[in-house]
Image: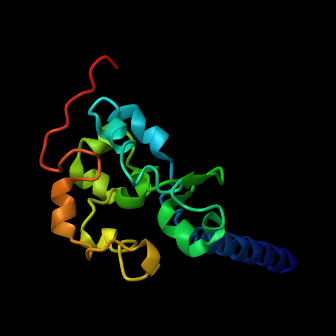
Amino acid sequence: MKRFVISFTMMALAMLFSASAFAADSTAVAVKHQFIGAKKCMMCHKKDNVYPTWLETKHAKAWESLKPEDQKNDKCVGCHTVGKDVAGELLTGVQCEACHGAGSDYMKMNIMKDKKLAADNGLIMPDEKVCKKCHNENVPEQYRSKEAFDFAKMKAKGVHAFAAKTEAKPAEGK
């Protein structure tokens, strides 16, 4: 009988610890997509001229457009940067991921070639709602455009320094 009680107690304790370990695993929060920075995007998007033409835009130069005191203002930083990468480095300027979502899980070529798979892994195809996170009435009046933000007009113009409907051509000599 004594052996039975000891065996039963040992089994009960083992089950208790197993159950709590399993519960901890099943309630673990999934890690969200991480920012990787435009330099990682460049590895593929230099060839299609998206990265080089983006460098010419106001979005690429958004951080530099801020006064030093505004670079310390969270309201300004939120729209003039992407956020921080895994290493904690601030990704300045309105880089790819500010509009297309954190790229850690969709950056691989085999994922990017499949639009649904890329979207399932965090790729965002920007719409008006994405743009209006920053292009809105919260922009301080002295920095606001004289014209209201017009998504259709801006989409046609493009944000990679070439019109959105124009096919990007590979950069020559690079």
Q: Is residue 78 placed above or below 139 in the rendered structure? A: above
In x, y percent, where is residue 95? 43, 52
Residue 122 appears in the picture as rendered:
no
Count the marks. 0
Task: Tell me which residue sits at (22%, 44%) in the image.
Answer: 162
Q: Is residue 143 placed above or below 100 in the rendered structure? A: below
Colouring scheme applied when the structure was drawn: rainbow
Task: Tell me which residue sits at (35%, 44%) in the image.
Answer: 54
Q: Is residue 19 left or right of residue 43?
A: right
In x, y percent, where is residue 48? 26, 33
Task: Tell me which residue sits at (35%, 32%) in the image.
Answer: 46
Location of the C terminus (image quadrant): top left
Location of the N terminus (image quadrant): bottom right
Q: Quadrant of residue 144?
A: bottom left
Front one among 98 and 53? 53
In x, y percent, where is residue 143? 44, 72
Task: Tell me which residue sits at (50%, 47%) in the image.
Answer: 37
Front one among 104 and 73? 73
Q: Is residue 44 left or right of residue 151?
A: right
Residue 103 appears in the picture as rendered:
yes
Q: Quadrant of residue 69?
A: bottom right
Q: Is residue 12 left or right of residue 170?
A: right
Front one among 22 and 154? 154
Q: Is residue 89 placed above or below 47 in the rendered structure? A: below
In x, y percent, where is residue 27? 57, 74
Determine the residue located farthest toward the top in the rendered image: 173
